[in-house]
């Protein structure tokens, strides 16, 4: 028997488009321990600042292509000419501060890894290496930030990262499964 994906109960924010549904069902809230994926999501959450997540999802393929799939080893080699060419690309978010932040954050990433061994070791220590499982019944109850995202944000800024405010960091935590903020009524609440 086939399941109609439109009949699956999802979190309220993930019902507007197929892109949102696919992201919700296959990515959001699933614990991530791969450094490249963690770094990529940190960058993408920073790119979202001031925009909707659906904007990022629509531009995802172009962003990944333009920024070499957010490989920090490649990003640290970007020079002024590369940054200028990126700012001519209509498929990305053409904000100079956000483009510069990608290169900056790649450099900060390597310094962080020198100290902690990996981004994975660094971020997951803030939640004792296991997801925080919340039990929200309404989307309005889900916070935009928490005391933990405040601490991570402050620490990342101290380490030279850009576009890592507390709301961005909480979105990152949700995305990479550090926190399970699926509504209890969501079919994916107990799966992640």
Image: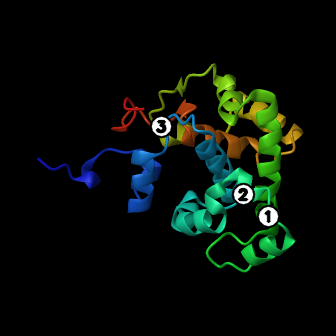
Circles 1 and 2 in contact, beta carbons < 8 Å: yes
Q: Residue furthest left?
A: 1
Q: Examine the image and state in which quarter residue 38 appears.
A: top right
Q: Which label belongs to residue 78?
A: 1
Q: Earlier in the sequence, mark 3 or mark 2?
A: 3
Q: Quadrant of residue 65?
A: bottom right
Task: Measuring from the top left, give residue 60's x and y in whole percent.
Answer: 55, 63
The residue under label 3 is 30
Question: Residue at left 61%, top 75%?
Answer: 91
Q: Is residue 28 above or below residue 180?
A: below
Percent across and percent down for residue 155 are 82, 34
How far apart marks 1 and 3 lie (CA) works out to 31 Å
Q: Dot 2: few (<14), some (14–19), or many (≥20) neighbours within 10 Å? A: few
Height in image: 2 above or below 148? Answer: below
- Residue at image position (28%, 46%) is 8
Q: Residue at x 79, y 42 (%)?
A: 110
Q: Give the quadrant of the C terminus.
A: top left
Q: Where is residue 88 shown, x and y percent of the image?
A: 73, 80
Q: Residue farthest to the top?
A: 128
């Amino acid at each position: 028997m086939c399941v109609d994906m439109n009949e699956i109960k999802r979190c309220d924010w993930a019902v507007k488009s197929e892109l949102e549904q696919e992201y919700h069902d296959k990515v959001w809230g699933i614990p991530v321990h791969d450094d490249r994926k963690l770094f990529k999501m940190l960058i993408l959450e920073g790119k979202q600042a001031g925009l909707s997540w659906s904007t990022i999802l629509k531009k995802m393929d172009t962003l990944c292509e333009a920024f070499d799939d957010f490989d920090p080893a490649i990003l640290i080699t970007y020079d002024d000419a590369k940054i200028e060419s990126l700012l001519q690309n209509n498929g990305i978010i053409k904000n100079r501060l956000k483009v510069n932040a990608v290169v900056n954050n790649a450099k900060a990433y390597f310094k962080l890894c020198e100290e902690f061994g990996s981004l994975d070791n660094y971020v997951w220590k803030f939640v004792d290496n296991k997801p925080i499982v919340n039990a929200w019944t309404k989307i309005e109850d889900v916070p935009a930030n928490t005391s933990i995202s405040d601490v991570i944000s402050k620490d990342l800024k101290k380490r030279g990262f850009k576009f890592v405010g507390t709301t961005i960091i909480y979105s990152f935590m949700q995305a990479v499964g550090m926190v399970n903020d699926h509504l209890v009524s969501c079919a994916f609440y107990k799966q992640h």
